[in-house]
Amino acid sequence: MTTPLIGAIEAGGTKFVIAVARADGTILAQRRVDTEAPSVTMPQVLDFFRAAAAEHGPLGGIGVGSFGPVDIDPASPTYGAITRTPKPGWAGSSYLEWLAPLGVPVVVDTDVNAAALGEWQAGAGQGTTTLAYTTVGTGIGTGVVRQGRPCGGFTHYETGHILPRRDPARDPFAGSCPYHGDCLEGLASGPAIIARYGLSLDRMADTTEAVALIADYLSDLAVTLMLVHAPDRLIFGGGVMKAPGLIDSLRGRTETKLAGYVGHARLDPGLASYIVGPGLGDLAGITGAIALGRSAMAGANV
Amino acid sequence: MTTPLIGAIEAGGTKFVIAVARADGTILAQRRVDTEAPSVTMPQVLDFFRAAAAEHGPLGGIGVGSFGPVDIDPASPTYGAITRTPKPGWAGSSYLEWLAPLGVPVVVDTDVNAAALGEWQAGAGQGTTTLAYTTVGTGIGTGVVRQGRPCGGFTHYETGHILPRRDPARDPFAGSCPYHGDCLEGLASGPAIIARYGLSLDRMADTTEAVALIADYLSDLAVTLMLVHAPDRLIFGGGVMKAPGLIDSLRGRTETKLAGYVGHARLDPGLASYIVGPGLGDLAGITGAIALGRSAMAGANV
């Protein structure tokens, strides 16, 4: 009998990337499905997996890296369910229930934990013991992988909602988070940038001021992650981070705020090898979802 | 042959508590030694262990919960050494080297990780999967235990140096941290309180304003820990936390800042069972150091 294949779902707010891969990670089939109500999206996912299995061989497990909030506690009765979201139909919707007809074990984690796992395994996080992967886009979130396992507590991390320092004289924008107003996501996410400036960073004629401000807020997260998780490396990805100069500015502000307190060989002057961009680009999520599927197949929740 | 005994050191900035215990944790001998230069303090520690071993039986391992910064990475060549400190003689001083004459395995972790482990095993953290123990005293620090193991990254956590939000109109005090000025430790530690008010909280006639201010700063750490570690429970201990009303005020400010974002059955209204005081009081550190010694004996770094 041949080794079973791995199913993988990168479940994002606007699209699902779904794939079937060999145990070694080689992708045999891949598709993109729009994120609509689960009753529309999930049957397409099932059809894809069934067709891929018919063509390439049976699946042995499925990994899901999902937008959240999602219940990622394997001991919880609602493990694998989206807990609450404005997305129509998704609140309470369970990946485990939708995928049950396929009859294979499923592991569900957050999109950022999956991306962190992908980067740890095959990207810019290779060789690290503790890795923090932060995405700055529609939302802000961080996945932490420690010794090859995604971390979490009673729920997944929500680093986008930390409260960075503010200087209202410099930035009078009140923030766009519906819960906290001026938490990090409310100040530095893609929608916050558009709400403040009327434009995304890639459409501004001169981004100097905006990049400096956003870097300043994001550096509060970088400092916090260093002080509270001490990762070997920080990856910052997502659409906002593509703005030219932003990662350099983030490195500079982070180093200034640390003020030499965390002295360690891992921290190179300028932090150029400590704070880095993703190595896998858009492939981090699906790579991580495949890794989650591998662990589902192995019967272990990573 | 009887089971070997466990040696334990709770190494604080002003005193060392040293003990010898049975494998079940029963303390057979205990002593307090002033923290002077290691060349003064450590020989007394060695004498105590030798005398206790002669009386009660041989040691099988020693656990150390130490003030920091201390190298707690077992893979590091300087594992077990204090890395830098103004305390005379301690910078570069290694517990492993001092204790080597005893010929037993030694595990070194931070004082707060040891206390967290003690509280998790026998105190207010029992039954949790992820526990965060914060001490607010001469310094501010947090130990996190996850599934019975102290957490750390490339170095131990340094939560005392996060940057809480400030309102200089309310609190013009510039902060007392030699590195960051107004980081959390610079604003809310015992020395910061004395520097700001000229008095510690337990000597003030009216603590209303001071307690509200300190609680406000500490709630930034509580929120950060929740968003970045999602512990099942937060323990806040240490001398400053003994101020009447402080923990209640901390609960209230934390709940306000979360603004309902983290909704979970673990979070009771008012957070009275989520943010708690220590269960072991002053025994947390030595209890945790014994647990570290047990793991040293088992040959595993917890």
Image (tube, coloured by chain):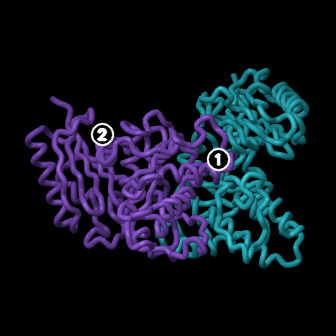
Chain colours: A cyan, B purple
Horizontal and vertical percent for residue A41?
A: 88, 34
**Numbered disc in front, either 1 or 2:** 2
**Which disc is residue A82 wearing?**
none
Residue B258 percent location from the top left of the image: 65, 50
Depth check: give the residue in front, B120 or A11. B120
Horizontal side of B235 relative to A276 (left or right) equals: left
- Res A297 seen here: yes
Disc 2 residue crowd, few under 14, some 14–19, many 20+, Cα 10 Å: many
Q: Quadrant of the C terminus of chain A?
A: top right
**In the displayed structure, does residue A302 sit left or right of residue B193?**
right
Residue B299 image offset from top left, x and y in percent: 32, 41
Q: Is residue A231 visible?
A: no
- At label 2, which amino acid type do we have? Arg
The percent position of residue A17, horizontal first and vertical second, equals 82, 42
Q: Secondary structure at mark 1?
A: helix
Residue under mark 1: which chain is it in? Answer: A
The amino acid pointed to by label 1 is Leu
Secondary structure under the numbered disc 2 in the rendered image? helix
Q: Are marks 1 and 2 in contact (CB under 8 Å)?
A: no
Residue drawn at 45 percent across, 73 percent down:
B196
Q: At 73% across and 27% down in the image, what residue appears?
A: A96
Label of residue B294 in the image: 2
Front-lying residue, A197 or B291: A197
Residue underneath mark 1 = A117
